[in-house]
Amino acid sequence: MNRAEAEQLLTWGYEQNPGPWADHCRVVSRAAQTIANKCGLDAERAYILGLLHDIGYYDYRDYKSRKADHIFTGYELMSDKGYEDVARICLSHSFTVQDIETFASSYVKCTDEQMAFIDAFLRDTVYNDYDRLIQLCDALGTAQGVVIIEKRLMDVTRRHGFRDKTIEKWESNLALKDYFDKLCCMNIYNLFHDEIKTNIFGG
């Protein structure tokens, strides 16, 4: 898939289900491209993976899916189209900890068979730097722009509630930032300094 095809697919998804999720995807893709450029990953690949990580929201109405949770509907859509690397990201981006019990969603709607598939995926998959990068950028990107991880994690917790493994998930997200700080040889917040300042403090 090239960038134009990915953009077209996101536009199609938004037309099926308009909402802030599409702007969030654009922010994630831009952040992923920027960090990938800095640490030597394929920036174009990172952009496309970030752009489509939440494509499963195409199936939602009022944040309720007709089929399954967005991670699985995205996985199925991308697999059916033959984009296995994007399909993988649709699942992996929500699991910084490879444990299905850490999923933050309060509206999971998957069959037992689908849940077993996700559980097996998490058990058997060895994450690569693109899995980690999109997980990180998912924790940096709001629909309005890039923010510090703590703000994004707090927003998610306020919407979905505090759970048994919330602290473990927070720690895994902060560890991702440390990992990419080292790969980039800098604090990655400096790549988005002005944007973060505006989104946190205004002006």
Image (cartoon, rainbow, N blue to C red):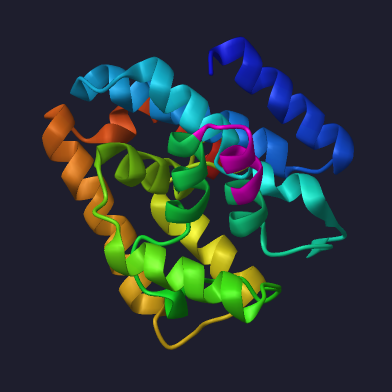
Q: In the depicted view, which residue is nearer to us: 31 or 102?
A: 102
Number of numbered callouts drawn: 0
Q: In the depicted view, which residue is nearer to us: 151 or 202?
A: 151
Q: Main secondary structure of the magenta part?
A: helix
Camera sees residue 17: yes
- The percent position of residue 182, horizontal first and vertical second, equals 12, 38
The residue at the point 70 percent across, 44 percent down is 21
- The percent position of residue 173, horizontal first and vertical second, equals 33, 58
The answer to whether residue 115 is left or right of residue 125 is right
- Quadrant housing the C terminus: top right
The residue at the point 63 percent across, 11 percent down is 4
The answer to whether residue 12 is left or right of residue 138 is right
Q: In the depicted view, which residue is nearer to us: 183 or 61?
A: 61
Image position of 76 with respect to 42: above or below: below
Q: For the magenta stretch, what is the residue range?
A: 76-83
Q: Say which quarter of the image contains residue 32.
A: top left
